[in-house]
Amino acid sequence: MTDPVEHWDIHPQHPWLRGAQPDQPVAFDDETGMWHVYGYAEAMEIINDFATYSSGVASRFASSKEETEVAFDGNLSQADPPGHKKLRKLVSRTFTHKMVTGMEPRIHELTNELLDQVEGDRFDLVEALAYPLPVIVICDLLGLPRSDREMLKNWGDQNLEARGQLTVRAGGEEHERRLDYQAESAMEMGFYLLEHVSERRTKPREDLLTKLVESEVDGDRLSDRQIVNFANLLLFAGHITTTMLLGNTMLCLDAFRDADALVRKDRSLVPSLVEESLRYLTPLAANYRTTTRDVQLGGRHIPEGEVLMVWLSAANRDANAWADPHVFDPTRDPNPHLGFGRGIHFCLGAPLARLEGRVALDILFDRYPELRTDPDNPPSFLTPPDFTGVWSLPLRVP
Ligand code: HEM
């Protein structure tokens, strides 16, 4: 088979996924009113300079500033130092390396349980494993009942459906409709989480929500709203991304048969397979920043207050940064991809995502000596341009 991007026509509007180097590393897009950043060096410059490139961009997309403050207080990904440092310290105390490594036996067991339910030789990887695994793991960590996962899925789906191309231009009716739809699910989920947080204040348990309620830095604790917003971020960032990682990896192995054979033969390559998958088909394809002053970047002058869409997926294929960027190589080493971001906002859940990826892939390889896409039943893909991943991935045992 050809490259999965060509074969399944993934994001036709992203030429860098098809071997083309963008003409310029930085370009202004009149339609969205945003600056697009494609170069690896430029992306690194932005991510490492949080004083010039602020993460607090959500207010530029949402309908009112007031709403955003309520929705994003406690959301690490929107915070800048010094607030970010304090918040990250508070949550890092609960989301520790030890806690993540302690999850391995449970992830192993859960993956087997989920795959035990697969009947026959055709199944949808997303439905059977790639969606439920990360969401159950997050529910268990936070202390939310596993049985609520359908409800959480519906809110997550509603959020995804409403997400189109983000724009800083005046939105119009369709944009407003999308925002209302998204706000509705966010509010319902917020109330649901608030109930759990309130309960932990009176009845502590052995879970992450209780630890967040009890966590303290310099005498300060997190407010209910901050815990709700952080839990919300974990639920969303923590599951859809890992679903995409698993799906993308299987798509790459389906297309690149030599790589598939190599990794199945030498399982010590599974961790570097995960890294290469994150580089080749970057799930969170872009992150966003806003300039706090006038800057020169990639030969362009960018005024203060502009919004930048930093294409991690393009930086991960930049020919100025990578040898053979369009070759899928699970032995690539080093592999300094930007799939988990970099700097102070480096993905808090990276150790968990890597663990889930490694365990799930290893078990899939054990159970199925071969797994292929189904020509009669092609995969479908998430539509937001900044997400690269499958919505469904029917597989068959040949
Ligand atoms: C941040 C990607 C899994 C929680 C980020 C960022 C990226 C990313 C690119 C940086 C965003 C920025 O710079 O603005 C991914 C990918 C994942 C994944 C590709 C899976 C393959 C997870 C998981 C969790 C998680 C499993 C939690 C359970 C977070 C949090 C942040 C973050 C809390 C914000 C950190 C901060 O701003 O300090 N992630 N993520 N992610 N991720 Fe992940």
Image (cartoon, rainbow, N blue to C red):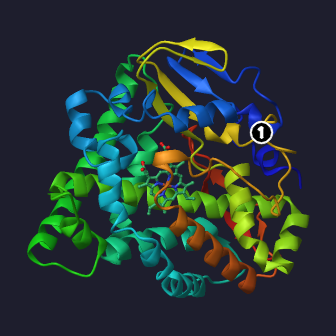
Q: Which residue reaches farthest front? A: 218
Q: Image quadrant for the C terminus? A: bottom right
Q: Is residue 177 left or right of residue 105?
A: left
Q: Residue at x 73, y 72 (%)?
A: 270
The number of numbered badges drawn on the structure is: 1
Farthest residue, direction left? 202
* Residue 69: x %, y % from top left: 23, 37
Judging from the image, what secondary structure is the residue with disc 1 in?
loop
Q: Give the residue type at disc 1.
A: Ala
> Horizontal placement of 62 versus 115: left or right?
left
Q: Residue shown at 65%/49% (left/top)?
A: 282
Q: Which residue is mark 1?
A: 321
Q: Quadrant of residue 111?
A: bottom right
Nearest the viewer among 320 and 311 is 320
Q: Where is residue 188 drawn, in percent x and y? A: 23, 53
Under 8 Å from ligand 1: the CB of mark 1? no
| Left-right relation of 249 to 126 | right
Q: Nearer the viewer, residue 245 or 220?
A: 220
Residue at image coords 86%, 60%: 256
Q: Is residue 222 above or below residue 182?
A: below
Is residue 231 visible in the rendered image? The answer is no
Binning the other alpha carbons within 10 Å of mark 1 as few (below 14), some (14 to 19) or many (20 upward) gives: some
* 106 shown above or below 281: below
Q: In the rendering, at what x and y percent does residue 168 appear?
A: 42, 21
Classify residue 227 as left or right of residue 348: left
Percent position of residue 379, x then y: 68, 56
The residue under the point 40% across, 45% down is: 77
State the image quarter where residue 144 is shown.
Answer: bottom left
Viewer-proximal residue, 166 or 268? 268
**From the image, which quarter does the N terminus lie in?**
bottom right
